[in-house]
Image: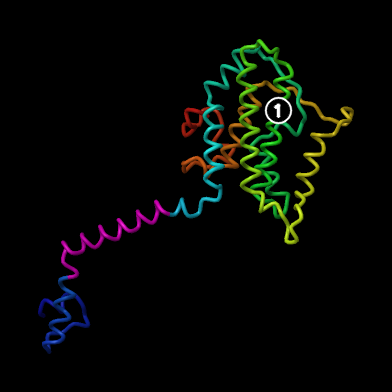
Amino acid sequence: MCDCERYSPVCSCNSKQKRAVCSNLKASLEPGTMTRTAAWLCGLLLGFVWVVPTVVMSTPAELCKSMNTLKASLNLINRRQYMKHNFPINYTIRVHYEEVFRVHNISRLRARVQGLEARELQNLWLLVNQQVLKRILRVLPERHPSHKYTSDLENLFRMVQQVFQQVFQQQQLGPQGEEREPPERIQEILDRMSDPDVKVWKWKSVRPKALLDNCYRTMHCLFQDCFQSNEDFCSILHWRKGNKRLPKQA
């Protein structure tokens, strides 16, 4: 058996043309050539993997920039200092039941509300946490060491809300140019939060740090394509204490 026949059963050495074809096949299967080809294919694949996240990213860049600024302000050191150490031990604040907005609330809404869009949950998150910050500010004297931080954070949320509205202004319009109504379940939550009749409110006592912890975690869940990570921030297991995968700033 000649060399070319070892590389392919369709090869034979019966003619010059076939010998030329088989010679090319043999060359393409030489170890050095295979290594170069494999390296080229791997490089192409890696390039594709790195390009894909920028293509499929759903949150606009200008909004992600604001979210990363907000993330920096909500870091763990700040949350501990301003929402825990500067308050009496076990100090709690009364908030609306709807203002205790956790990761599992997001999962529940996604499962129960048909056609729920990401921007509707993001808008709800912004409104809920602005209300939370207002409630914290109401119990803080102006000279309290946490007052300025909380006030600055509230202003930052207001700025993010403005960016959010500018980015999604066109998407909030219906086919006839009218403003689209949020899903019924989302509207119910917003209505209860703004209901002036305090008798119908459901209250819950929560520590200030726990409120901002909820804010930080749900932010990562709803805007996770703004934060470069392979972690599933919408998983409750991700945020459990003792989880070794937990980010240092969680």
- Residue 48 image position (x, y, % from top left): 38, 56
Question: In front here: 94 or 6?
Answer: 94
Query: Quarter-wise, where is residue 83 in the image?
Result: top right
Q: Is residue 37 magenta?
A: yes
Residue that appears at 16% across and 76% down: 24
Question: In front here: 24 or 195?
Answer: 195
Q: Which residue is mark 1?
A: 132
Image quadrant holding the N terminus, namely bottom left
Colour pattern of the rendering: rainbow
Horizontal relation, residue 115 to residue 225: left or right: right
Query: Quarter-wise, where is residue 90 in the image?
Result: top right
Q: Is residue 26 above or below residue 134?
A: below
Horizontal relation, residue 36 to residue 133: left or right: left
Question: In front here: 25 or 193?
Answer: 193
- Residue 220 image position (x, y, % from top left): 56, 38
Residue numbers of the magenta segment? 28-51
- Residue 160 image position (x, y, % from top left): 61, 36
Residue that appears at 60% across and 42% down: 222
Q: Is residue 54 above or below residue 208?
A: below
Task: Count up the numbered dots.
Answer: 1
Residue that appears at 70% across and 28% down: 132
Please, what secondary structure does the residue beneath circle 1 have? helix
Q: Residues within 10 Å of mark 1 (few under 14, many from 20)?
A: many
Q: Is residue 220 magenta?
A: no
Question: In front here: 125 or 109?
Answer: 125
Q: Main secondary structure of the magenta part?
A: helix
- Residue 123 image position (x, y, % from top left): 68, 42
Q: Amino acid at mark 1?
A: Val
